[in-house]
Amino acid sequence: MIISHKHKFIFIKTPKTAGTSIEIALSAICGPDDVITPISNWDEQFRTAHGGRGPQNFKIPYNHLPVRRKIHKVIRPRMRYEFFNHYTASDLKKVMTDDIFNTYFKFSFDRNPFDKFTSLFFFHGGVERWKNLSNFLNHPNTMRTLDGYHNYGLNSRPLVDKVFKLENISDALHQLCNRFELSENELRLPSVKTKSKTKRQGMHYKELIDSSIREELEIRFAREIKLLDYTF
């Protein structure tokens, strides 16, 4: 997650949507007062090589904490409250002042859920580990990992101003450059994709997902499909 006071935006990171690459790109345009949450040690090295700023200002100020957490802080003074990379918009709204949360441009990225599902399947071992997509779909951790809507929405509505499609990322970066008054080369993705161990040997998700899996995914990802007009 990034909160940029310099450019007045909030980036809410979602899983399996090139979030770390986007985060690295955005950190390169941030100022010293902006909030940048930590990523893995390997990715931090990559961020430094890309010219991005490292983690900074990610401890939540005491005066921003809800009353319940302030009381908890008094009882346990060593308890640390920090923003982290997949901090949700709904949680952020609880600790962020209204003048920032309501006026900054809040955005996120999501991805075709059928493609995202098969990508995660292979990322976590594919056929060798799970035997088939049905076993993977029914594992309790799968949907929790894939639920990007949980990061940027609450119930039936998004809490961000814009959810970009990952499939249209070039156009999205162009729009962001215009909004933040940047040149095209100031906001660019890293030249090497992070977390790139997913391998599908060129297979399209339509070759992998049968009708029963498709129907189940359409139910579970109904909000994303409707919001972003995704189709199988």
Image: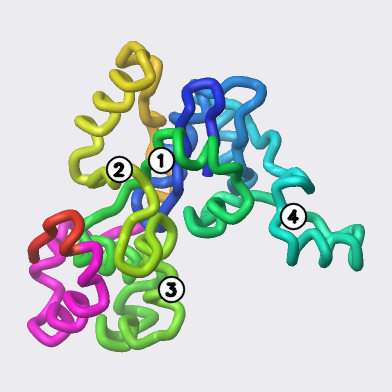
Q: Residue at x 20, y 31 (%)?
A: 171
First-in-chain label (2 vs 1): 1
Q: Is residue 207 magenta?
A: yes
Q: Nearer the viewer, residue 154 or 203?
A: 154
First-in-chain label (2 vs 4): 4
Question: Which residue is under mark 2?
Answer: 162
Which part of the image, by quadrant, shows the C terminus? bottom left
Q: Residue at x 80, y 59 (%)?
A: 70
Distance between mark 2 and mark 4 Cα atoms: 27 Å
Q: Nearer the viewer, residue 152 or 144?
A: 152
Label 2–label 1 contact, CB within 8 A: yes
Q: Is residue 45 above or below residue 6?
A: below
Q: Is residue 163 above or below residue 183?
A: below
Q: Which mark is residue 20?
A: none
Q: Nearer the viewer, residue 138 or 58?
A: 58
First-in-chain label (3 vs 4): 4
Question: Which kind of residue does numbered mark 1 sit on?
Answer: Lys
Distance between mark 3 and mark 1 Cα atoms: 22 Å
Q: Is residue 182 magenta?
A: no
Question: Which residue is under mark 1?
Answer: 106
Give the image quarter of residue 148. bottom left
Distance between mark 3 and mark 2 Cα atoms: 22 Å
Q: Which residues are magenta?
A: 198-224
Residue 222 spot, x, y in % from top left: 21, 71
Question: Which residue is under mark 4?
Answer: 81
Residue 157 spot, x, y in % from top left: 31, 60
First-in-chain label (4 vs 1): 4
Q: Residues within 10 Å of mark 2 (few under 14, many from 20)?
A: few
Question: Which residue is under mark 3?
Answer: 144
Question: Which kind of residue does numbered mark 2 sit on?
Answer: Lys
Question: Which kind of residue does numbered mark 3 sit on?
Answer: Arg
First-in-chain label (3 vs 1): 1
